[in-house]
Image (cartoon, rainbow, N blue to C red):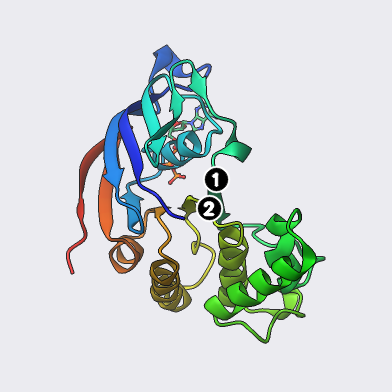
Amino acid sequence: MSVRLELDDLSVVYDGARDGHPAVAGVSLSLEAGRIGCLLGPSGCGKTTVLKAIAGFEPVRAGQVRLGGSVLSAPGVHVQPERRRVGMMFQEYALFPHLSAAENVAFGLRRRPAPERRARVAELLALVDLADAGERYPHQLSGGQQQRIALARALAPEPALLLLDEPFSNLDGATRERLSVEVRDILHRAGQTAMLVTHHHSEARTLADDIGTMHNGRLTDWAAAPR
Ligand SMILES: Nc1ncnc2c1ncn2[C@@H]1O[C@H](COP(=O)(O)OP(=O)(O)OP(=O)(O)O)[C@@H](O)[C@H]1O
C-alpha cells in the first residue's frame, strides 16, 4: 500500500564537506499517497542526496523523513534502508544480465511461496505490457523494454514509496518521452507514491503530479504540475 511522504526541514551534510557546507539544506515537502513528485534542478544541486536521505543511504543532519507518518530519519533516528519499504529504480545497470525478465522481476520476491511469486510476476509483466517477454534476457530487449522490466522489478515487493533517479537518461529523446507517459500511467494504475529526480523539464512535466526545483541544496518551490 502506498503512503504519504513528508520531508520536514531536511538537511544533509556529507562527511568531509568543505566548511561543513550542507548538500541539502532545509528541504520541506509533502507528497500525498499515490502521487508522483519530481525534483528538478542542475547538476550538483542536491537532488540525488535528497533521494539518498529518503532511502536511508545518508543520515540526516537536521529535520525528518516521514513515510506514512512514521519517522524514518531524524537526528538520532535511522531506520535501516532494507526496513524502509522504499523501492528504487536507476538509469544504469538496472537488470541482472544473466537472469530472464521474469527472474529479474521475481528477484525481490525470493521469500514468498513459489505460486504467489509466479502470480505476482505475471501480474507485473502484464502491468508493464510485457506479458510475453518473461523468458527473454535483458540483451534481447530494447532499452525501453528493459526499463519497463526494471520498473516491474521495483514494484514487485509493493514498496510504500518508489524512488526514480534519472531513470531514462540513457535513452534517446523519443523513447524517453514515450516511456515517461507509459511509466506515469503504470504508476497511477498501481496507485504508487513515487519520487523522481531528473534534469529534463519535459520528463518532469509529463510524469509528475507535483514538481519542485532545487538550487544549491534548497528547494525553491513545490507545487502541482500545470496540466
Ligand atoms: N559522497 C559525497 N561526499 C561529499 N560530497 C558529495 C557526495 N555526494 C555528493 N556530494 C556533493 O553534494 C552536492 C549535491 O550532490 P547531488 O549528487 O545530490 O546532486 P544532484 O543534483 O543529484 O546532481 P546530478 O544531477 O549531477 O546527479 C554536490 O555538491 C556534490 O558534489
Under mark 1, the amino acid is Arg
Instruction: From the top left corner, tell me how far across and down residue 160 is, in percent.
Output: 48, 50
Secondary element at tag 2:
loop
Q: Quick one: 69 or 166, which is closer to the camera? A: 69
The quarter of the picture where residue 102 lies is: bottom right
Q: Is residue 35 above or below residue 76?
A: below
Q: Residue at x 55, y 56 (%)?
A: 89
**Could one spot residue 19 in this view of the protein?**
yes
Q: Is residue 224 left or right of residue 72?
A: left
Q: Is residue 131 above or below residue 92?
A: below
Q: Is residue 103 above or below residue 49?
A: below
Residue labelled with disc 2 = 159
Classify 10 Å Cα crowding around label 1: few (below 14), some (14-19), many (20 and above). Answer: some
Under mark 2, the amino acid is Pro
The quarter of the picture where residue 158 lies is: bottom right
Q: Residue at x 53, y 53 (%)?
A: 159
Q: Residue furthest right?
A: 98
- Which numbered disc flags the more N-terminal residue, 1 or 2? 1
Instruction: From the top left corner, tell me how far across and down residue 201 is, in percent.
Output: 30, 60
Instruction: From the top left corner, tell me how far across and down residue 208 is, in percent.
Output: 31, 61
Q: Quick one: 166 or 57, which is closer to the camera? A: 57
Instruction: Give how far apart the Cα atoms at labels 1 and 2 are.
Output: 5 Å
Do the numbered discs 1 and 2 sit on residues whose CB atoms are within 8 Å?
A: yes
Q: Is residue 100 left or right of residue 208?
A: right
Residue labelled with disc 1 = 85
Secondary element at tag 1:
loop
The quarter of the picture where residue 128 lies is: bottom right
**Could one spot residue 128 in this view of the protein?**
no
Residue 73 is marked as none
| Label 1 lies in ligand 1 vicinity (Cβ under 8 Å) | no
